[in-house]
Amino acid sequence: MTDPLLAFRPEFPILERTTYLVSNSLGAMPRGVPDRLAEYVDEWAEQGVRAWGRAWWQMPSGVGDEIAPLIGAAPGEVVMVGNVTLGQATVLSALDYPPERNRIVMTALDFPSVRYVYGRLARRLGAEIVVVPANADGISVDAAAVAAAIDERTRLVCISHVLFRSAFVMDVAPIARRAHEMGALLSLDAFHAVGVLPVDVKALGVDFLTG
């Protein structure tokens, strides 16, 4: 049976001469990008600030609606932002952290920029970071250990679906169930998962997904 995704392969010129495995850093450029960038330049040159009202302002949500089926989301539930770190910072700063529920659970193997933003911003917001250590192999984290770290003081759980350094796949669903049982929310960094693994935010029980 032919993989239907192979129909899109000709749209990425670099795949004609190499096997490209570094999309986690910079994705292969689609063939249509130069033309779309030229359109953007023309819109800017001809419309100036009016381009916001005619097309640009709606673009983040419009592109989000195109992406929504990839993650099992509904139209209107996805919006484009600059990067995962910015998206995670938006989630973090949108919540309050009273003393009785101010803990954020993360793992030692989450992406460094996300760990950095949470570590810096959480202190300003009065939140406490609880870091679940890696397993002895140094490349995986036990989902049961993450779930055990979630208690009645947990406000937010922020974990990666696929660990960036090792490609270890976290078992998200039981962590989400534990978070909701304790009244906490789950923010999932799926940057290294979407497009590689099947991702369904409803089935996983995810409250926020960035990727």
Image (cartoon, grey):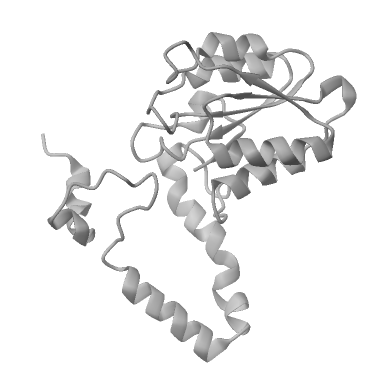
Work out whether residue 70 or residue 19 is closer to the camera in this orientation and state it. 19
Using the image, determine if residue 193 lies above or below residue 170: below
Total marks shown come to: 0
Q: Position of residue 18 (x, y in %)?
A: 16, 51
* Residue lying at 37% horizontally and 28% vertically, measured from the top left: 167
Q: Which picture quadrant has residue 162?
A: top left
Left or right of residue 46: residue 52: right
Q: Position of residue 112 (x, y in %)?
A: 55, 37
Residue at horizontal 67 percent and vertical 44 percent from the top: 89
User: In the image, is residue 20 above or below residue 148?
Assistant: below
Q: Where does the image place residue 24, in percent across and percent down from the top left? A: 38, 44
| Residue 87 against residue 43 in the figure, above or below | above
Q: Residue at x 51, y 60 (%)?
A: 62
**Residue occupying the far bottom of the picture:** 46
Q: Quadrant of the N terminus?
A: top left
- Closest to the observer, 204 or 143: 143
Furthest-left residue in this view: 1
- Residue at figure coordinates x 76%, y 36% from the top left: 122
Which is nearer the eye, 24 or 116? 116
Going by the picture, which residue comes out furthest to the right?
99
Which of these two is toward me, 50 or 16?
A: 16
